[in-house]
Each structure stands twice: as structure tokens, then as C-alpha cells.
């Protein structure tokens, strides 16, 4: 799972196995270990009408409605966006980069812009 935060915008990208785990288990999380504490970011299935986010005790949790998660899992939909308070949210599938990168992309979704 990748997270990008810029001002009042939170963007999370998920690999194929992460979307599958989120769909099957209802939650996924990652953490960054700092010297004294961890920063945790998570995505959870929720009984809500739209995307939302909360930040409690160094943990960002993006909540996705079950109906949207079903679409993310079972269709070619790339992702969803929303607003929670002042924060713009974006949850999307992580695609293979078109340029060369050293990052392991073996679990990313095939990029729809790739030419064969």
C-alpha cells in the first residue's frame, strides 16, 4: 500500500493482493517505524454511504463503503474519490509504471496504457 499526503489530500494506492485482502478480510494496514513511535495507515470496509477518513493516535484510516469495495474488487474501475471534512480522498488501484523503475511492481495491476 502506498500513501501520498499533500496538504489536505490523502491518496492511497493498492496492489492486486491488497485489494483482495481488503475485500476478503475487511481491513489492511501498513506502518512506518520512527524512532519513538509508528505512523500507521489503513483502509477498512465500513457501513457508510461514502469514503471517509479518520486520524486517531498516529493512524490514518480511510473507510470505504462495502458497495464501492465490491466494485473495486470485481470490476475494472480504477478507484474512487471523495471528501471528508476538509480532506480530499483518493483510493485507487496501483498500476505498473510505464517508465523504468527499480520498485517491485509484480503485484501491481497491468497498466491500461501499455501498448503491445
Image (cartoon, rainbow, N blue to C red):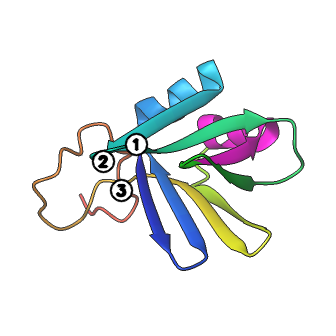
The location of residue 115, given as percent across then percent down, is 27, 63
Give the answer, above or below, for where 33 lies relative to 87.
above
State the residue in front, 89 or 68.
89
Classify 10 Å Cα crowding around label 3: few (below 14), some (14-19), many (20 and above). Answer: few
- Quarter of the figure with the C terminus: bottom left
Mark 3 or mark 2: which comes first in sequence? 2
The label number, if any, that marks residue 34 in the structure image: 2
Give the answer, above or below, for where 6 lies relative to 20.
below
Q: Quadrant of residue 85?
A: bottom right
The label number, if any, that marks residue 38 in the structure image: 1
Classify 10 Å Cα crowding around label 2: few (below 14), some (14-19), many (20 and above). Answer: few
* Residue at the extreme bottom: 7
x 89%, y 49%: residue = 49
The question of residue 61 being in magenta is answered with: yes
Q: What residue sits right under mark 3 in the picture?
A: 111
The location of residue 69, given as percent across then percent down, is 69, 39
* Residue at the extreme front: 36
Mark 1 residue element: strand
The question of residue 68 being in magenta is answered with: yes
**Could you tell whether 17 is left or right of 34 in the image?**
right
Classify 10 Å Cα crowding around label 1: few (below 14), some (14-19), many (20 and above). Answer: some
x 24%, y 45%: residue = 105
Q: Which residues are magenta?
A: 60-74
x 39%, y 43%: residue = 37
The mark total stands at 3
x 30%, y 48%: residue = 34
The location of residue 81, given as percent across then percent down, is 68, 64
Label 3 or label 2, whichever lies nearer to me, is 2
Amino acid at each position: 500500500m502506498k500513501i501520498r499526503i499533500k496538504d489536505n489530500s490523502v491518496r492511497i494506492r493498492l496492489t492486486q493482493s491488497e485489494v483482495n485482502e481488503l475485500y476478503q478480510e475487511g481491513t489492511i494496514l501498513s506502518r512506518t517505524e520512527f524512532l519513538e513511535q509508528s505512523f500507521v495507515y489503513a483502509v477498512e470496509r465500513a457501513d457508510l454511504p461514502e469514503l471517509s477518513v479518520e486520524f486517531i493516535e498516529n493512524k490514518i484510516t480511510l473507510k470505504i463503503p462495502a458497495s464501492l469495495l465490491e466494485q473495486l474488487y470485481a470490476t475494472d474501475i480504477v478507484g474512487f474519490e471523495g471528501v471528508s471534512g476538509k480532506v480530499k480522498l483518493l483510493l485507487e488501484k496501483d498500476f505498473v509504471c510505464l517508465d523504468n523503475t527499480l520498485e517491485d511492481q509484480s503485484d501491481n495491476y497491468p497498466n491500461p496504457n501499455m501498448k503491445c
